[in-house]
Amino acid sequence: MRVRPLLRGMTAVAALTLAATACSTKAPDAASDGAVRTGEGVTDSTLTLGVLSDLSNVFGPLGQSLVQGNELYFNQRNADGGVCGRQVKLEIRDHAYNVQTSVSQFAELEPKVLGFVQLLGSPIVSALAPKIASTGAVTVPATWSTDWLNKDGLVIVGSAYPVDVINGIQYLLDEGKIKKGDTLGHVYFEGDYGSDALKGSKHAADALGLKVKSVQVAPSATDLTAQFNELTSGGAPQAFIVSAGPRQTASIAGLAAGSGLKTPILANGPGFDPALLDTPVGRTLADNLYVATSYEPFAGGSAGARTIADAYTAAHPDGKPTNMVNYGYATASVMGQAIDAACEGGDLTREGLTKALRSLDGVETGVMPVLNLSDASRFPSASSYINRVDPAVKGGLVVAKDPFTSDAATTFTG
């Protein structure tokens, strides 16, 4: 099934209306009595989805933006009659990046929901993956590790951490910010996120004639002086890569500036929060930071990004958006389109939703490259936006290079 674009080339008002009505919400002819089979989380009038996010700890501001993006999409759908004739309800919980808390919250919510439109945090996904597989509760992880491929119940939206790193390194090379033979200093979180991203820098180094020096850091670490000294001993690297959280990005930027370095810094999407621009390292980030993502930033210039920004501003006039608003909206859109397909197939059970998701091979969200969700062994996209910091725009990022797939990324197999 190829899903047609919902946002491209429309006015904001038309886009929001058509996003909600592009797919049929009538009971399909496929069911003999015109009814739709239902399961957990679905009644005649409501459809409940779960959200397990970090709203208060390592990725708190980013998690809040993700939730707001999820809400924007489903609020629009609800205002226009719902999904499959039902109002969508989001059950939201803050696990505060604590694995045990997330396990308890999942146990509470799982029997009540059709699936989870957001599950943030690699350690959280790793802990819950067996339960997701056994219950069939379709889950969109807000994490892009290759470890989630071929995992029952997990449906990844976007590209992989290592692919974003590879494409980002290619960009730095193409722009002359690094050159063949240079050393990259990679700071990474322990666990699935950082370790997976490190595979990308090592692959890029092998493919592009570079060297990598890496150091691991815990999510609780905010002063990376020891790690910085380790990376710069024997000579400073020509670029830093940060596959960690915003606080770790800020620490590396501050230490580099304090050492007189004007070194480019490349971060994965979770490594940037626009709130950093109001700190003493804001100027350094504006000068040196690049962020690789599979989704367009909040201040992106596409029709889809502008439509989401208008809707966000109307809903949160005093809000402080991050680049994750667009990703939250996009993942909700993918889930919404899958529910539409399941409805058309007459099956709103977890099995029906899984089948519907895997039937989508040309999904357009307006703020991501076209996604192919039909193959659980591959990421839906291998393309990355490269963004640069701009303190003058909401969200703090603008597109430096439209989504592309480098040759080195095409040869990465994980």
Image: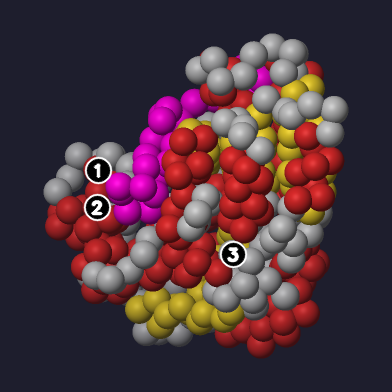
Give the CA separation, mark 1 to mark 3. Answer: 28 Å
Q: What amino acid type is highlighted by mark number 2?
A: Thr
- In this picture, is 387 found above or below 129? above
Q: Is residue 81 above or below residue 44?
A: above
Residue 59's disc number? 3
Compared to residue 185, the image places residue 359 above or below, namely below
Instruction: Identify which residue is drawn at 36% across, 47% down.
Output: 391
Residue 308: image x %, image y %? Answer: 29, 55
Asked if the residue under mark 1 is in contact with the one under mark 2, i.e. CB atoms within 8 Å, the reply is yes
Q: Which residue is mark 2?
A: 307
- Residue 194 locus on image (x, y percent): 74, 48
Residues drawn in magenta: 388-413
| Quadrant holding the C terminus | top right
Q: Nearer the viewer, residue 44 or 364?
A: 364
The amino acid pointed to by label 1 is Ala
Determine the secondary structure under disc 3: loop
Residue on which disc 1 sits: 303
Give whichever of discs 2 and 3 has the lower sequence position.
3
On the image, the x and y values in percent for residue 240 come to 67, 35
Tell me the crowding category of disc 3: few under 14, some 14 to 19, or many 20 or more residues within 10 angstroms, Cα based: many
> Residues under labels 2 and 3: Cα distance?
25 Å
> How is the structure coloured here?
secondary structure
Report how far apart the C-alphas of labels 2 and 1 lie in the structure: 6 Å
Note whether residue 136 is visible. Answer: yes
Q: Is residue 299 left or right of residue 202?
A: left
Nearer the camera: disc 1 or disc 3: 3
Element class at badge 2: helix
Kindly identify the amino acid type of the residue bearing the numbered disc 3: Phe
- Percent from the top left, x then y, of residue 202? 78, 29
